[in-house]
Image (cartoon, rainbow, N blue to C red):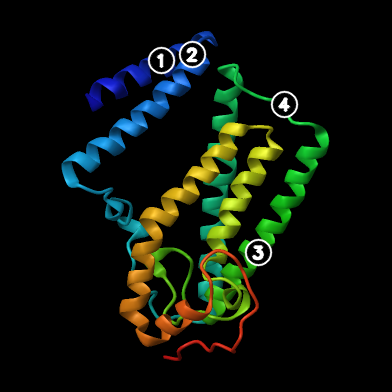
Amino acid sequence: MVPWTLLVAAGMAGYATITGEAGGGALLMVVASLGSVAAGLLVVLGRLPGEWLLVGPFAFRPAEPAPARVHVRRTGVQMLGFWGAFLVLLPLGLAALERRWGLQLAAPGGVRLAGAGLLVLASGLGVWSAWSMSRRGAGTPLPAVTARRLVVTGPYRLVRNPMAIAGITQGVAVGILLSSWIVTLYALCGSIVWNTLIRPAEEADLQARFGAEFTAYQENVPCWVPRLPLTEQRPQQG
């Protein structure tokens, strides 16, 4: 059933892209195919296998010891790569399909301007978070070269996942800027995937490596909604 649904979805997407017709049907079939894949995994495995996403550069491994400037440089390269892929190339492709399929809903100029401002703010949070990770954590945001120390300074004093918040907000802002509801939905769906499949594995890795220190941090700093810290947290040294 799942292969057949995928085949029909691919056929309808191809037809809508070539002809510019039946875009709504193509989108529904794409959504149905993703639902079929998820349902198939639940039937076969009894769960969604988040570990399938945590391979290669996304597998958790602490960074090798290196000077702080090396981690900062690596972090900069990673951010350029991820931002270019997930905030430029993929959104532009989705927005182009949206227009081709006749599904675009034009946003007023003021709304798009607000999206641009939101993008700047979210990008600033992302840079601040990445700087704190590379300088204080002796690593980078990429799981394969993740921080060697628990970072509880900078934006991490206010919320446990500032980079995730920044990335999700950036995606939504890009969708608003492009006047693309599909790109906005893509960003919001990405937040669900991250929270459901990635975050538990990340927190298990932090718990295994930092133990009671991470437990205390987890108890005092919220996951998603920032708040002022009640006590000063200090990163583990070594």
Quick check: marks 2 and 1 in contact, CB under 8 Å?
Answer: yes
Mark 1: amino acid: Met
**Residue 111: % across, % down:** 77, 39
Give me the residue at 37% from left, 27% from top.
32
Q: CA distance from mark 2 to mark 4?
A: 20 Å
Above or below, comparing residue 178 to residue 156 in the picture: above
Could you tell me how far apart the alpha carbons at marks 1 and 3 are, in whole angstroms? 40 Å
Q: Which numbered marker is on residue 204?
A: none
- Tell me the residue that label 2 is attached to: 16
Residue in the picture at 67% in, 57% down:
122
For disc 4, the neighbor class at 10 Å (few under 14, some 14 to 19, many from 20) is few
Mark 4 or mark 3: whose residue is earlier in sequence: 4
Q: Nearer the viewer, mark 4 or mark 3?
A: 4
Callout 3 environment at 10 Å: few (<14), some (14 to 19), or many (20+)?
many
Whole-percent x and y of residue 213?
42, 86
Q: Are marks 1 and 4 in contact (CB under 8 Å)?
A: no
Q: Amino acid at mark 3?
A: Leu
167 vs 116, left or right, is left
Q: Earlier in the sequence, mark 2 or mark 4?
A: 2
Kindly indicate the quadrant of the structure image that contains residue 210.
Answer: bottom left
Q: Position of residue 59 (x, y in %)?
A: 32, 62
Nearer to the camera, 16 or 89: 16
Q: Disc 2 versus disc 3: distance between alpha carbons? A: 38 Å
Residues 184 and 91: in front is 184
* Residue that carries the numbered disc 3 in the rendered image: 125
**Residue at mark 4 to residue at mark 3: CA–CA distance:** 28 Å
Residue 12 badge = 1
Identify which amino acid the numbered label 4 is placed on: Ala
Say what amino acid the circle numbered 2 marks: Ala
- Residue indicated by mark 4: 106
Q: Which quadrant does the N terminus fall into?
A: top left
